[in-house]
Image: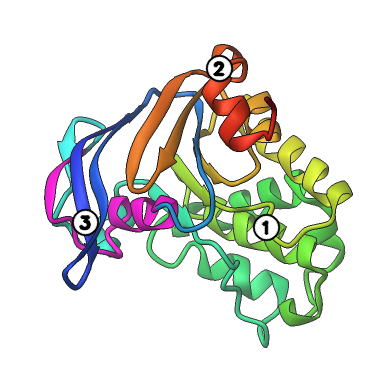
Amino acid sequence: MLEVKGLRSGYGSVEVLRGIDLDIQAGEIVALLGSNGVGKTTFASVVSGLIKAWSGTIRFKDEEIRGLSEQAIVDRGLIHVPEGRHIFPNLSVRENLELGAYRRGKANRTRNLDHVFGVFPRLRERFAQKAGTLSGGEQQMLAIGRGMMAEPQLLILDEPSIGLSPLLVEEMFELIEQLNRDGLTILLVEQNVLQSMEIASRAFVMENGEIRLSGQASVLIDDPELQRSYLGLA
């Protein structure tokens, strides 16, 4: 569904991504892992058209999308839920969700709204509430639900667990796994290595703008370099 080869990009004259190769098959959860500041968010932003790629290829459903606008990429079904949620705090939960269908999914807005409320029952309970009054976990659910309103074929989730309590982190990963079981292909961009590995089929570990490790998550979790560098195990 997504094939990225030799991707380079950055800010000004500073190169952040140094030749990234990554692929995602339909129906997978693929985790992009690494510490803060290694380039994960930059990668997600380049793929979704928010930041310009310097070189390399980005193919989505066998179409080259490098150079397309972010709106055109959304129209094709690649939806990015950014780090930090970026909800509209003065709008209601329902209004935030409906804005998710502004460019894509408008014809099925009512059906998709019911689907989101089925996945996130707490949003149904708070549908008339101002989004800014929700808890951190509920705001993250709202951000993901807004992405779902656009009928994604590939959903990029950037740091969905950041700032959440351990209990809410567990719940968030269970919800992501449920979305995948329902048929949604997901790129999970995370610092939380262990829990991401538990739900992902494959993983790519980024360091200093390069992919350092990659493979089946169930195998990669036992890699000595991963355990030493990211899990603090000798």
Residue type (three-letter) at the residue carrying disc 1: Ile
For the N terminus, the quadrant is top left
Residue 153 in view, yes or no: no
Colouring of the image: rainbow
Q: CA distance from mark 1 to mark 3?
A: 25 Å
Q: Is residue 152 left or right of residue 65?
A: right
SS label for mark 1 = loop
Bounds of the magenta span? 39-58
Residue 204: % across, % down: 44, 31
Query: Would you name the residue on which mark 1 appears?
Result: 162
Q: Nearer the viewer, mark 3 or mark 2?
A: 2
Residue 150: % across, % down: 47, 54
Q: Nearer the viewer, mark 1 or mark 2?
A: 2
Q: Residues within 10 Å of mark 1 (few under 14, many from 20)?
A: some
Compared to residue 150, the image places residue 226 above or below, namely: above
Residue type (three-letter) at the residue carrying disc 3: Ser
Q: Residue at x 54, y 49 (%)?
A: 35
Q: Residues within 10 Å of mark 2 (few under 14, many from 20)?
A: few
Query: Would you identify the image quadrant in which residue 152 lies?
Result: top left
Query: Would you name the residue on which mark 2 appears?
Result: 223
Residue 179 in view, yes or no: yes
Residue 92: say if magenta: no
Residue 31: % across, % down: 52, 34
Does the residue at mark 1 contact the one at mark 3 (Cβ under 8 Å)? no
Query: Would you name the residue on which mark 3 appears?
Result: 9
